[in-house]
Image: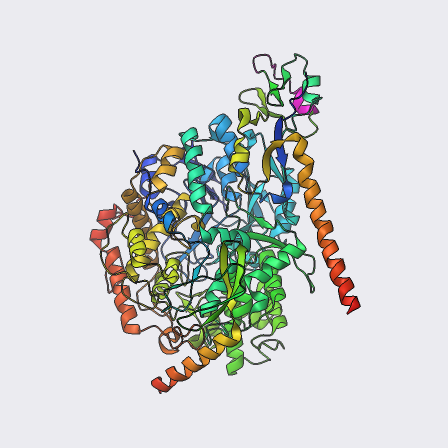
Amino acid sequence: MFKDKSTAETLKSTRTYGQFRCPNPTCLDRLVPKPGEKTVKCPKCGTEWRVVWLKPDLPRIRGPVWETNIEIARKKLEEVEKKGG
Amino acid sequence: MALSRRVAYIDLSTGKIETKPIPVEIRKKFLGGRGLDAYLLYNHCPPGVDAFSPENPLIVSAGLLVGTLASATSRTHTMAKSPLTGLLGSCNMGGFFSPELRWAGFDHLVIKGKADKPVYIWIHNGEIEIRDAKNLWGKSVTDAQWAVREELGDPDVKCLVCGPAGEKLVRYANVMTGVKNAGGRTGMGAVMGSKNLKLIAVRGTMDIKIAYPKEALEFNKRFIEQITTAKVNQTMGILGTPFIWGATNSWGGVRVNNFQYNQLLFADDVEPERFHEISNETFGKYHMAGCFACQVHCRARYRIPDGPYKGCYDEGPEYTTQGAFASEVGCTSALTVLTGNYLCNQYGVDWLELGSLISWAMELYEKGILTIKDTGGIDLRFGNDEAVIEMIKHVCERDTWLGDVLAEGGLRAAEIIGKDSEQYLIHVKGMQNLHSDERATPALALNIATASRGSDHLRSRPAIDLYHLPEPVLRKIYSSPIPYDGPLSSDFREYAGKPWQVFWQEQCFMAVDCLGICKYHTTFLGATLPNFEDWPKVIYYNTGLEFTPQELWTIAERCNNMERLFNIREGLTPDDPHKGDILVDRYFNEPAKRGAPDVIGARIDREKFLKMRAEFYRYHGWDEKTGAPTEETLKRLGIDNEPSHLL
Amino acid sequence: MHEKANAKALVINYEKCTGCRLCELVCSVYHNGVSNPAKARIKVEKWEWEGLYIPMSCRQCIDAPCMNVCPVRAISRDEELGRVVVDHNVCIGCRSCVAVCPFGAMGFDPAERKVFKCDLCDGDPQCVRFCDEKAVNYTEVSRESLFRKRDAAEKIAQAHKKSTELISEMLD
């Protein structure tokens, strides 16, 4: 009477452990921190992130490495404001 | 039988109580919970009535699957006309109240009138009694609940309660249950207060017959597995919802200093892991708790580690608490967030609204529109932790000029304060936005602009839009159960395809609210969580009712249109800055200054936004000029004769 | 008449309980086909104002008071599964067993006029099957105290770690 597997259930196979995506919207690629690593740097846009390991295979972004990302943001803001002005 | 639960009409003015069965035909049209509430509200609320008038009905309900085997079947929905917005008032909460309501024999309560002195309603195995609440009035959310248990002599009594903020008619007071489960937004607690109704106590030991118990058990096992193995729910089960704030702040999607920035810098003390540590230290290693029949357990238990409330037990905080008492007000102290969380839970007030209003007042103070005389001597600077805590108390007690003004909600306060104060307000339809900053995310911007209860994320937010999911995955999700072959984009800064996603989420969230299941168990924060194709199975095994995924979609559309009919009747027009589907100007004019490099400079393009909105209306079958459902739409959904007074 | 050495029982680690009461729900659905915690053989007792949740169920006592008090000998031990069982054909519904159980684990269904208690679901307890947190376990009774030992030892281990840190700080 029911289709055996729903779309949600079939999508389960697309779950990826041990990695996450760079939060910068143009960096669609995944960041894969080495097991236990506390920070990870995006090879594409240079942003840097602090990592928390909730489980041995479940890393999550804890927050930005402030100094690195604030500096990148400052430069970008200058650029944008120059263009806008 | 789950379908044998009744609706009760309780008139507090006359003391008259009447109960009726809910016909299966009505179930098939509106399911239950929020959807049937919307039908009852449209039918029982006289047009144009004042929200604090005895004629405004307060509707409390359990969803169709509440108490049954479908995972997290815990949700209580409450509806009335909102004293904050004058439009739809609607809130949803977890905990243990609504299952108990069903075991006591009821699904929907329609409470009208106003008692001449404080009362509470006692519901026990099919019986309803209105009782004197003079010993409960004035008590905090938790004290009132424990006191009524004592009075009734049963520790298993569950309550839906308004706190002191509701009694004082703070226009965004919550209804609550347990220590922290809150039906927040739109001020349903104030409607309780206006009726002199302190709480509803329920206790039930009646069977809810499960249609196919064996199959229900087996399918539920599979359903739970699908839910708990999702990465997002594993994270939530460890860190709770604060992880959402942490993730959003990381790239710059959080309002800071009201709306001046979009990222809270050096926020280490209010990051989710910090709260995790505090819970570990003050409660223990196993500090997460769950609502009824939920295996995600996103609620942390803790004691306040320091300060004047040191040692007080509470649960939370949530991502919205970090938003309210950290980023929006520019504070970076865990203690402020935890203390604010505790005070709001005790007073029974919506911190999304309150945090946003305090941060607005702070910006007015910075601009000189409010002076230290207006604040009653409080130095209302951004980042002043003590000022935030003081303001929470003053608003809930209404004991200073500014506290009393802010208790009226943003638009009324702006009218009293005058000058240019309204232009700094971040609201839609008179409801303050939560802490999120949608300038870089057009989909989320469309969501808050069009949400039926005001600026809100829980009506239609396509949160998975932020995950950069590959297009084929998005297509799989968003083209079922209704085909969609338009554009879809992995980039959250895009405008194309977003109206459909918001439209889809709107039906998804309505369906889950009708069923009484938590949103963390559907396509909200996780792409692989159950939705339309999975629900027919749980509905069938538990109740015996047969639906196709498409039929559930149509029911959700019907219910959303009932809410829309109510809003249109109460004065919604698309471009009205106070009652419309429109963002405040700051979204269009002020670019984002912080966060990930590709978020910097982001703002919403007005023209593109209006195009999105028009497309969104088209999907609904709403007139683009008036925003109202067309005659054809109402006919298609079978609601062209409302109010039809069938219940 | 000796207990089988490997007999299993419900072993409850209350600290892990999240208070969700799914165990109560699945218990009543499995045994009665209904959702009704009043008919569940397990119940989570709560002290909500301090966040304490403690699941309570039958301890399957060896010298069971319910068994001893039963005037018609309707209650006996099933040594195979290490459980105490009620023979409903013999039970007269006097509720003496309900009154005497020190854990409140014997229930009474007024509609059926029958007592009910945990039967370990004939060896596949549903409460255990559905508890993701493993607050309720189905474990050999001989291993019950091992959990507690480990938990208590962990606290000592932590204290030890802290004290060595403190000493090394002092030496600095």
Residue in the image at 37% along x and 48% along y: A13
Colour approach in the figure: rainbow
| Viewer-side residue, C168 vs C104 | C168
Tell me if B532 is positioned left or right of B157 in this view. Answer: left
**Residue B629, position in %: x, y?**
26, 56
Residue B125 seen in render: no
Tell me if B502 is positioned left or right of A23 in this view. Answer: left
Query: In the image as oriented, which residue stretches furthest toward the left?
Result: B632
Please tell me how many numbered marks the rendered image carries: 0
Residue in the image at 29% along x and 67% along y: B495
| Viewer-side residue, B97 vs B144 | B97
- Tell me, yes or no, whether the highlighted magenta stretch contains residue B595: no
* Quadrant of the snapshot with the N terminus of chain B: top left
**Residue B225, position in %: x, y?**
45, 42
- Tell me, yes or no, whether the highlighted magenta stretch contains residue C96: yes
**Residue B59, position in %: x, y?**
44, 47
The quadrant holding residue B307 is bottom right
Vertical relation: B166 (above or below) A28: above
| Viewer-side residue, C14 vs B134 | C14
* Quadrant of the snapshot with the C terminus of chain B: top left
Vertical relation: C46 (above or below) B250: above
Segment tinted magenta in the rendering: C88-100
The secondary structure that most of the magenta stretch takes on is loop
The quadrant holding residue B84 is bottom left
Vertical relation: B521 (above or below) B588: above
Tell me if B64 is positioned left or right of B182 in this view. Answer: left
